[in-house]
Amino acid sequence: MSDTNAPETRRNFYGRSKGKTLRASQKDYLAHDLEVLRLKGVTRDENPTRQPLDLSQFQGRPLWLEVGFGGGEHLVHMAALNPQIHLIGCEPFVNGVAMLLGKIRAAGVTNLSIHPGDVRDLFDVLPEAVIEKTFLNYPDPWPKARHHRRRFVTQGYLQALHRVTRPGSEFRIATDIPDYVRQAHEEVPVAGFALEHEAGEGGAWSDWISTRYEQKAFREGRFPHYLTFRRS
């Protein structure tokens, strides 16, 4: 993620977009499933004038957002658990997108859309106050101090999130990095989200599903922290 947040400027992207070689099945998911599930009207090629996103594609359902869905476990779990809503998942890492598509096939969920790119592209075209719940699960920690400005919990991202979320909407953060918790405490309230609840290991939300990144943290001796903010 970049420290350049104005939509008019060209953005640098610092995270990975590709990883290990994809399996044949994953290539098949990308070739045949992604276009059906891809969120329409987000990329600059599709929407060069950056017109507001056409919300009719969500059929009037409440909108939830997951920023960086990793391998997709949480996104699919939430879609299956809440068939009355529509979930948008943003993830620029193609391997994660391929993993998600496989999980979607297996679960048979249909109430979600994918933006396989930078969440700021979505923020550029979302109308104001349309997102009712947001998830940020195990975001890239950018551990070096000089890279902390690349974290999602900085004002460029958070102010954009505030604009597109409804008053009273919930913003959940799960992380195993204590310094990320520190920065979230400092930055998120400044952007207009009040801390409602926080908990450590064993205190996750009742509808939480442990992800592959959380399990990796456990194996490596790191423990989760769960923060719930409410848009004021």
Image (spheres, rainbow, N blue to C red):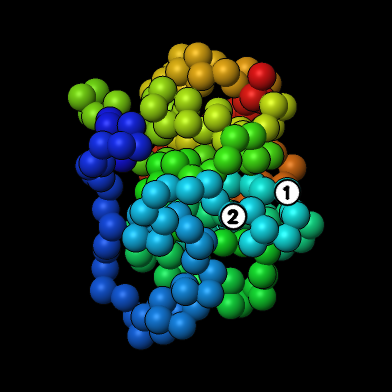
Q: Is residue 89 left or right of residue 82?
A: left
Where residue 220 sits in the image (x, y, percent)? 38, 44
Question: Looking at the picture, does residue 198 appear above or below residue 31?
Answer: above
In which image quadrant can residue 17 be found? bottom left
**Residue in the image at 63% along x and 17% along y:** 194
Which residue bears the numbered disc 1? Answer: 62
**Residue in the image at 67% along x and 70% along y:** 109
> Please, what is the three-letter code of the amino acid marked with disc 2?
Asp
Where residue 66 sits in the image (x, y, percent)? 55, 47
From where the camera sits, is residue 230 visible? yes
Q: Distance between the residues labelled 1 and 2?
A: 14 Å
Q: Dot 2, how many residues are within 10 Å of its Cα: few (below 14), some (14-19), or many (20+)? A: few
> Please, what is the three-letter code of the amino acid marked with disc 1?
Pro
Question: Looking at the picture, does residue 216 appear above or below residue 112?
Answer: above
Where residue 188 sits in the image (x, y, percent)? 51, 21
Q: Dot 1, how many residues are within 10 Å of its Cα: few (below 14), some (14-19), or many (20+)? A: some
Observer-nearest residue: 226 or 149?
A: 149
**Residue in the image at 53% along x and 74% along y:** 36
Q: In this view, does 3 lie to the left or right of 200?
A: left
State how many labels appear. 2
**Residue in the image at 73% along x and 48% along y:** 62
Which mark, residue 54? 2
- Give the residue at the far right of this rendering: 84
- Foreground disc of the pair 1, 2: 2
Where residue 228 sits in the image (x, y, percent)? 63, 28
Q: Is mark 1 on a helix, strand or loop?
A: loop
Question: Looking at the picture, does residue 144 appear above or below residue 85?
Answer: above
Mark closer to the chain start, 1 or 2:
2
